[in-house]
Amino acid sequence: MMEAYDRFELLINDRIVKTPIAIASMAGIVDAAYVLERAPHIGAAFIGGYSIDRPTLEASAQMAAEGRKEFIYDDPVEELARQVKLLEKSDVVTGINLRGSTPAAYREIAEALEESVVYEIDAHCRQPAMVEAGCGEYLLHHPARLVETVRELKSAGVTVSVKIRAGVTADDRALAVALWKAGADILHIDLMDFGHAKLRQIRNVCPLTLIANNGITSFDKAMDMFARGADLVSLARKSDPWTLSGLDAAITRSAEETGWYNAPKQLCRGGDIRALTFCCMPVKNCPLLPTLEKIGMSRDDYLKMKQEAVMGTPLAEGKNTCFGSLAWCCKASSPCMFRNMTLQKMGISIQDYMRYKHRLADKLMHRLFNGASAADTD
């Protein structure tokens, strides 16, 4: 069996994610004990939500009195440290979903616990008591405060995730760009009823690690999200061991069979910006041309970017392919006699070919977004 990193090439908080399945927070339910019961089949978990200052603790108490499940405690740091301690020997990457009324409240928690966990800002909760306390969806209606919170939390030198609900703020793409530029590392998106089209839009404007959430309980749904830009999928109410084990087995099998578990669809079939790794030279009228125009890249710059990115790799070879290099070859699922003959002659498996394409996509994403304006594609 392959090692987890070789299978998924996925890191969060400098830790290997053994499978791209996460548990999303559910207040009063998802704690360390909940995670440990499911640990064999998840790669990451966000415990909480945990209220971390007086206004949100009072909101939690109010919600609990009204019959909702909540974590109730006197000292947030003490309780969070206890939960983190229980999980420290687990191979699950731990995140803590936090609800605070001020940016400083988040930083204070991070300074107390340091970089042992991922810190997730809860901009998702829509319970009136939490919104009135200045967290949850309040932050989506006041994005400047959310950006300020990301900056404040990031100043503690930790990995920052933001949990949002799609369709609440005026422009999810603009929000994603603002959060990325403020220092966020992960965007955890409750897609509601928007599906993968919304995910693809966000993938096309930022290089953040994306976690897709809401109703993703089957292999087919997970693969739809992976093909449109998700790095992980997360489950909440359906995060039972049976569902998680089935997803884990199917995604692992697919990764080993294909070589790239979240390979995008080709650009001409609705793929996201990562699909440039499969595009040929810009010599015909196809979706590549309007995509280059939207991201403000000339054809010559695209050619140069891709040629430089494959230098020193097997993708630079392949003189008998359509354009003289595997750099311009399509996804392995598309039949191509010339590509396959070239790979066979070079002794490269289809799975390894896709792994090389994965690494090429990572390089292209880095070059597109490192110091450049975000892409603006649909």
Image (cartoon, grey):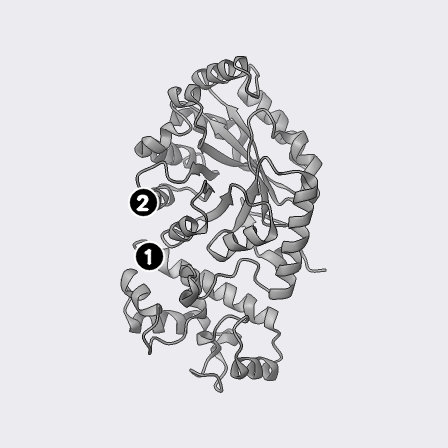
Seen in the picture, residue 15 relative to 59 is either above or below; the reply is below
Seen in the picture, residue 46 relative to 301 is either above or below; the reply is above
**Element under disc 2:** helix
x then y, percent, for residue 140:
36, 33
Mark with earlier residue (2, 1):
2
Give the residue pinned by disc 2: 174
Give the residue pinned by disc 1: 377
Quarter of the figure with the C terminus: bottom left
Task: Answer with the quarter of the image where residue 187 lies.
Answer: top left
Which residue does the image show at 66% across and 44% down from the upper left?
244
x then y, percent, for residue 374:
32, 53
In the displayed structure image, the side of residue 102 where residue 342 appears, left or right: right
Which residue does the image show at 38% across and 23% down from the upper left?
134
- Whole-angstrom CA distance, mark 2 to mark 1, is 12 Å
Total number of numbered discs in the rendering: 2
Quarter of the figure with the N terminus: bottom right
Seen in the picture, residue 80 relative to 91 is either above or below; the reply is above
In the displayed structure image, the side of residue 368 where residue 186 appears, left or right: right
Local packing at callout 2 (Cα closer than 10 Å; few below 14, some 14-19, many 20+) is some
